[in-house]
């Protein structure tokens, strides 16, 4: 059943939709701006519709469904909301940020008693749009739709994507901020999460002036200039805007600690050794390390150092470890199919990991070149690869014939070596 948000959460008193500094509230009431030209529903997540929103897949054929997921129609009795939050960008306080192109369009309690908040992304301007147009383009929306679902099936807590809608409405973007403005197609993703609150939701109220983008539920909620790493490189950064490498792969722990320090300032809880123990348990589960020893951290660090030295493919090296036999490792007779492991096959600590990895490691991730290929086809109204990737990524640990024939577990093609992503979306 659809439910409303708690009445005691403060709402902006100003009802007009214009960009401004908003004070002393959590939400602003603002309606989406519907598309007008050739609006199409091109992909849905049947799992989200069925198991999160209690909807039969047949509902996607109804006009009212398209109108809802595109922002044209709002559920009866609900007023759309844009969320006010603050934040840092690259470690520097940016003040008020907020939902500049997203609208909360409802909350739903499903048959399992779970409460899910429904949010449209790319649905038009809000008081928090700053200089933006409130829209999202097709390429970034395809990436978000695919990656949020891929992360879910990899076992990573994340927001989910229910649907992807595209239109022929023109959206103008300078993708790499080099003066080359291009016309692109607009798109909207219907996203669901148990909450869209983040650390900055609290800090904008307390005015503590510290924040990074991190969900209060510790889920992945924003898919901007992300990228799955190919060759292991501690300095890997997919975002062209991150010139100093603040969010490089080797600095993720520091960035995460920065986030948590800001939450500490907002809530001021007392932390003890339980947090360290939980981190160790989660990382051990990821790597398949059995038991609890002081050597676990050293084993993790050694393997990562070896990956860095050899620049072996990050994803496939782990996957190879889960599939190759102990005898093959001990004999150093590495079959050609385990191409990522061949450069690091002499490491003596590998055999003890093999059996514990096999149930934990993924074969398919949404690599940049895969998302780019799907996006290019989408620009020609061919969404077949979007749907194929959605299906493949829902079973990332299982070898799949279609995925193998498409090369999704192979080295990236040569044309993909120079692919970049940016904040433009």
Image: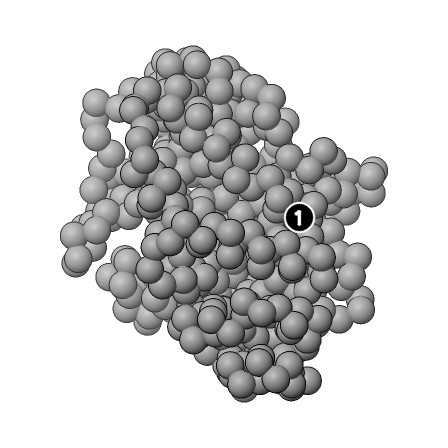
Classify 181 as above or below 354.
above
Question: Which image quarter: residue 63?
Answer: bottom left
Residue for point 45% across, 44% down: 221
> Residue 133 placed where, x, y %?
61, 35
Pick whichever, 64 or 184, lies toward us. Answer: 184
Badge 1: few (under 14), some or many (20 or more) residues near its Cα, within 10 Å? some
Tell me the quarter of the image containing the C terminus.
top right
Residue for point 82% across, 43% down: 180
Residue 252 visible, this angle = yes
**Number of dots carrying numbers:** 1
Classify 25 as above or below 106.
above
* Residue carrying label 1: 234
> Residue 302 placed where, x, y %?
58, 55
Which residue reaches farthest right?
Answer: 179
Residue 125 visible, this angle = no
Task: Name the secondary structure under disc 1.
Answer: loop
Residue for point 71% across, 57% down: 309
Pick whichever, 253 or 302, lies toward us. Answer: 302
Classify 161 as above or below 210.
below
> Residue 105 placed where, x, y %?
35, 42
């Amino acid at each position: 059943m659809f439910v409303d948000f708690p009445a005691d959460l403060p709402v902006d008193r100003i009802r007009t939709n214009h960009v401004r500094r908003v004070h002393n509230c959590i939400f602003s009431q603002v309606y989406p701006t519907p598309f007008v030209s050739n609006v199409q529903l091109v992909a849905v997540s049947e799992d989200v519709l069925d198991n999160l929103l209690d909807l039969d897949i047949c509902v996607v054929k109804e006009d009212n469904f398209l109108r809802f997921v595109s922002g044209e129609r709002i559920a009866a009795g609900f007023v759309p909301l844009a969320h006010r939050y603050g934040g840092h960008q690259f470690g520097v306080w940016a003040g008020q940020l907020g939902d500049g192109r997203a609208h909360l369009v409802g909350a739903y309690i499903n048959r399992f008693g779970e409460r899910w908040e429904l949010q449209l992304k790319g649905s038009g301007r809000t008081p928090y749009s700053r200089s933006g147009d409130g829209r999202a383009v097709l390429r970034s929306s395809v990436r978000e739709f695919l990656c949020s679902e891929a992360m879910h099936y990899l076992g990573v807590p994340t927001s989910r994507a229910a649907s992807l809608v595209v239109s022929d409405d023109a959206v103008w973007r300078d993708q790499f901020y080099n003066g080359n403005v291009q016309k692109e197609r607009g798109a909207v993703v219907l996203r669901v999460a148990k909450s869209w609150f983040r650390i900055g939701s609290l800090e904008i109220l307390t005015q503590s002036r510290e924040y990074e983008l991190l969900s209060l539920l510790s889920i992945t909620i924003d898919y901007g200039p992300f990228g799955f790493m190919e060759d292991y490189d501690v300095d890997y950064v997919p975002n062209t805007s991150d010139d100093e490498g603040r969010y490089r792969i080797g600095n993720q722990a520091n960035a995460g600690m920065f986030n948590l320090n800001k939450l500490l300032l907002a809530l001021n809880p007392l932390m003890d050794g339980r947090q360290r123990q939980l981190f160790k348990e989660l990382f051990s589960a990821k790597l398949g390390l059995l038991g609890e020893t002081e050597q676990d951290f050293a084993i993790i660090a050694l393997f990562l150092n070896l990956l860095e030295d050899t620049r072996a493919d990050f994803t496939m090296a782990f996957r190879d470890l889960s599939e190759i036999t102990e005898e093959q490792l001990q004999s150093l007779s590495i079959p050609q199919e385990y191409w990522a492991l061949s450069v690091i096959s002499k490491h003596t600590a590998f055999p003890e990991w093999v059996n514990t990895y096999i149930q934990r490691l993924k074969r398919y991730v949404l690599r940049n070149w895969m998302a780019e290929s799907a996006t290019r086809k989408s620009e020609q109204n061919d969404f077949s690869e979007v749907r194929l990737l959605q299906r493949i990524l829902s079973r990332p640990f299982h070898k799949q014939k279609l995925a193998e024939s498409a090369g999704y577990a192979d080295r990236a093609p040569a044309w993909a070596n120079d692919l970049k992503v940016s904040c433009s979306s």
